[in-house]
Image (tube, rainbow, N blue to C red):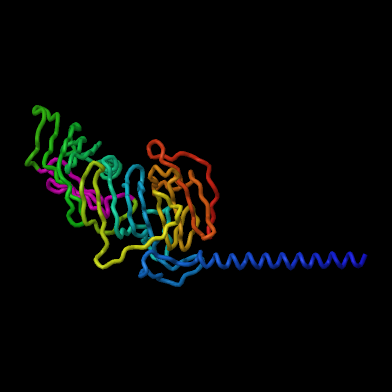
Amino acid sequence: MRAIIAALLGLAAATQVHADSAIDRQQRELGVLRQGWYQQTPPAADYKATRPGSLRDSGQDGVGLLLHNVDMYFQDGIGFHSPELKGWLVPLKAGEPVDFDRPQDMRIEVSEGEVILSPEQLSNLFNQHILAYPESMLRDFSLSVDGDRLLVSGEVQPLGIGPWLPLRLSGTVKLDGDNLDYRPDSVKVLGVPSYGAMSLVGLRLDSLVSLERPGAKLEDNVMHLNYHKVFPLVGIDGQVESSWLDAKGLHLKFARKPGAQALAFAPPLQAGPSYIWLQSGDLKIFEILITYSQVLLKAEQPDQPLAFNLKDYRKVLASGITQVNEDGTFFMRVPPAGPAGGVRLVSSGNGSSR
């Protein structure tokens, strides 16, 4: 009996040693993984942390941003398509994470890339934002492109008095510093009492209507759109070096500052043809703080661009599938947009923070 008890005690001790060694091995492996989780890899070598890093604060202000074949929306249908764009999401208050629940407290610093506003997106920008105030004398804009000309049809209430009348504009868009200037050289108001149709060539448009909104101003016969300020929620920094119109819409090409190096991003191999990659810095999503960010938002369907709406990001991401890889990367597959910019509901996975 004593021999049996001694054997059992020995087996128990050996089992405990084995368990301890397994725990030690797991802790060693976890330690190696943690070194990767809390390693800062900003896409610019000269983008330094402004304070000592910790588990809850990487010490870096801003998150590296890479868009690749993405439909980016700020709210509702207001946004653009980007074949590729590189830059930063930067909090307005130093020391704070980039919080997707407070987009008004961040700005986008574009280093380089291109965005395209389709005629529909341009129409949405006017109808849902620029002209969306009670005293507006312009409404119901529909924009289209004919060669290098931008055509506008809508309604005008001259001087804010009387009935709404059909309006037709035709002109070019020229880049002038921080402004995109729409210069209509054909202005027609239809259905003017006693006159039928009236061509207002030579008559200043601002003598009929007034328009002065954040990022948009009508002056003489020119509508100035400041691309830094005209979009809702988020300001955009960066320099547009050229713009042009074609069948796709209005193209804006951002260029790097003279002497600046290209940002170097390292998205995962499974990123696919359409994705948003967020690299380094601190990000807050769904009240989860992600430090030393490695976050991939990927289109679920490879044949459709990722559609991401910043204001309604919770609805967009909650309808997808989320996982956290061993290297600390948050990996989110986003379903395609449904009717009216909505999302198609699918089962969702679990997410966690480091």
Which residue is most to the right? Answer: 1
* Up/down of 316 relative to 33, above or below: above
In the image as oriented, which residue stretches furthest toward the left? 202
Residue 4: % across, % down? 89, 64
Residue closest to the eye, 271 or 86 = 271
**21 to 67, vertically: above or below:** below
In terms of depth relative to the viewer, which is nearer, 29 or 91? 29
Task: From this view, report whether residue 13 is shown above or below residue 85.
Answer: below
The image shows residue 241 at horizontal and vertical percentages of 22, 57
Q: Position of residue 159 (x, y in %)?
A: 16, 39
Residue drawn 51% across the image and 50% down it? 322
Towards the viewer: 305 or 319: 305
- On screen, residue 244 versus residue 34, left or right, reads left
Question: Horizontal placement of 158 versus 301: left or right?
Answer: left
Q: Is residue 217 magenta?
A: yes
Question: Can residue 337 be found in the magenta stretch?
Answer: no
Q: Is residue 262 left or right of residue 38?
A: left
Range drawn in magenta? 204-232
Quarter in which the N terminus is drawn:
bottom right
Using the image as rendered, state which of residue 308 and residue 92 is in the foreground. 308
Q: How many marks?
A: 0
**Rendering coords of residue 156 (x, y %):** 19, 36
- Identity of the residue furthest to the bottom in this view: 52
**Residue at screen point 54% across, 59% down:** 326
